[in-house]
Amino acid sequence: MSTNENSQTGCVLSEDVRRYYLDTMGIQVWQSLENQPDDIETDVPANSDVIWQQLEQAVSSCTKCELHTSRTQTVFGVGNKSADLLIIGEAPGRDEDLQGEPFVGRAGQLLNAMLAAIGFQREQVYIANILKCRPPNNRDPKPEEVGACNTWLQQQIELIQPDVILALGRIAAHKLLNTDQSLGALRGKQHKYAGIPLIVSYHPAYLLRKPVEKRKSWQDLKRIKLLLNSNGSST
């Protein structure tokens, strides 16, 4: 992750709470935190479940950008909170906004099939998006919206500490890698995000429109499987 990105990973959790879960997982605190809002209680939680509950509650009441005025509900994320594989898409669509869960509908069904092809059930991975709220008419996220949501996603990544991250689609790849290179140029390589191996692939919604690209997507999935196997991860 670039130095610029590191400077934008502020946290609404209190200093004590942040240090608690970072110390528990053996993660070095990247920076001191100042001017903490009061979204989350400052008592040190007994376990990570409490931290997740506090984080999800903070997301559900977030008003950091204009998207809170048009959302049905926030789409926090779903899955195994200690997953080896973290999947990150771009933003909720209509179905996700209605159901409050990322990657549902036809795109979600295809994602489930893709995971099954490498030996994973949906419940074994964690799935999130760059944005927690749906942009109107599924337009591309604005920079200020991505910036507002960055805190939430960064905290999820720090809590999960996955072995591999899969970025699905152009928006997710650009945000996580701090680049504007084309998706085609980013595919087929191993990148790093905060020291975590990151693979870029096509969004399932794109694959539904361009089925011919599923062959390339399969190559990306096989690369992920190899990375997980090399890390000793189990399905």
Image (cartoon, rainbow, N blue to C red):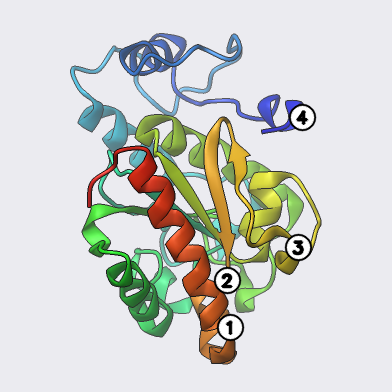
Q: Are marks 3 and 2 in contact (CB under 8 Å)?
A: no
Mark nearer the viewer, 4 or 1: 1
Q: Which residue is identified by label 1?
A: 213
Mark nearer the viewer, 3 or 4: 3
Depicted 151 relative to depicted 27: above or below: below
Residue that appears at 67% across and 43% down:
147
Depicted 101 relative to depicted 31: above or below: below
Q: Secondary structure at mark 1?
A: helix
Q: Of label 3 and label 2, which has the lower sequence position?
A: 3
Residue 22 image position (x, y, % from top left): 40, 16
Q: Which residue is identified by label 3?
A: 185
Q: Which residue is identified by label 2?
A: 202
Using the image, tell me which numbered label, if any, was put on residue 46.
none
Q: Which one is nearer the viewer's eye here, 221 or 103?
A: 221
Q: Are marks 2 and 1 in contact (CB under 8 Å)?
A: yes
Q: Of label 3 and label 1, which has the lower sequence position?
A: 3
